[in-house]
Image: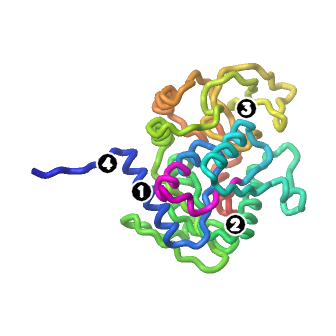
Amino acid sequence: MTTTYELTHLRGLEAEAVHVFREVAASFERPALLFSGGKDSAVMLRIATKAFWPAPLPFPVLHIDTGHNFDEVIDFRDRTARRLGLRLLVGSVQDDIDAGRSVEQPGAGRNRLQTQTLLRSIGEHRFDAVFGGARRDEEKARAKERVFSFRDEFGQWDPRNQRPELWHLYNGRHRKGEHIRVFPLSDWTELDIWQYVLDEGIALPSIYYAHRRTVFERDGMLLATNPHLTPGEDEQPYEATVRFRTVGDTTCTGCVPSTAGTVRDVVAEVAAARVTERGATRADDRISEAGMEDRKREGYF
């Protein structure tokens, strides 16, 4: 009599991600995990803690703070860091603006300015590997990424200069000044993320669930009024029941009408969705067909 052991779809994805975390910890001297407080980084953090349990996380978490964040997300970030005893590092976009390293354009969001702050933070802390929560199903440029994404001494990404990863074999070789972006959730989908949140009981910021908020419509997208974003003269604000599918800068992150107030409700809603969360709710991805790829070539996430 033979006994077979088979992993479910989610446990298979989890096992692959655990392998990636342990591979990086064994191969790099100074890794860090990008943690914004969003759903993908929360799942990534849960898997990382599993990968090294019962030891504490062997690397710090890093947040690139635009200064234009949702209060609920920053509160969740800080509470999570305290609860898990994480070493939280924050790279401030405002610091770069004040120092003249970045120039803020009137009326424009700060998402693009994160690149300078990210590269500065990587250089200051001498990180040689940085975990990110990007997934290939989110956007066309991210679909081109390898799990180990090589970045040159300027932090730039060249999609033609990436290494093969046959049989999940990863090449982390790099020279001084270069680094690797690592994406353990590359093969996950938005539905996978939410099903894992359900299975693991992972806490998330409240804005991911249905709530009442004052919004207005701009370019076919619902944006929430906030201190950093006000409607124009022809944009009439109103109150609606909405939730956010993704979390980012308040000036470019849209929400969707929804009554999904629990994780199970969100799983059902995402299962029926036909547009990715970035396609439906991120205004900064609409600047051009190659908007995300252009930013990634400059050093963006």
* Residues packed near mark 4 inside 10 Å, few (<14), some (14 to 19) or many (20 plus): few
Label 3 to label 4, Cα distance in Å?
A: 40 Å
Q: Earlier in the sequence, mark 3 or mark 4?
A: 4
The residue identified by callout 1 is 16
- The spot of residue 134 in percent (x, y) is 56, 52
Label ID, residue 223: 3
* Residues packed near mark 2 inside 10 Å, few (<14), some (14 to 19) or many (20 plus): many
The residue identified by callout 2 is 122
Type of amino acid at the residue the image marks with label 3: Leu
Pointers 3 and 4 in contact (C-beta within 8 Å): no
Would you identify the image quadrant in which residue 247 lies? top right
- The spot of residue 276 in percent (x, y) is 55, 39
Would you identify the image quadrant in which residue 235 lies? top right
- Could you say whether the residue bearing mark 3 is in a helix, strand or loop? strand
* Residue stretch rendered in magenta on the structure: 45-63
- The number of numbered discs placed on residues in the rendered structure image is 4
- Could you say whether the residue bearing mark 2 is in a helix, strand or loop? helix
Side (left or right) of 51 relative to 249 = left
Label 3 to label 2, Cα distance in Å?
A: 32 Å
Type of amino acid at the residue the image marks with label 2: Ile
Q: Earlier in the sequence, mark 4 or mark 1?
A: 4
Side (left or right) of 267 relative to 108 = left
213 relative to 3, above or below: above
Label 3 to label 1, Cα distance in Å?
A: 36 Å
In this view, which residue lies farthest toward the left?
1
The residue identified by callout 4 is 7
Name the foreground residue: 137 vs 18.
18
Q: Quadrant of the C terminus?
A: bottom right
Type of amino acid at the residue the image marks with label 4: Leu
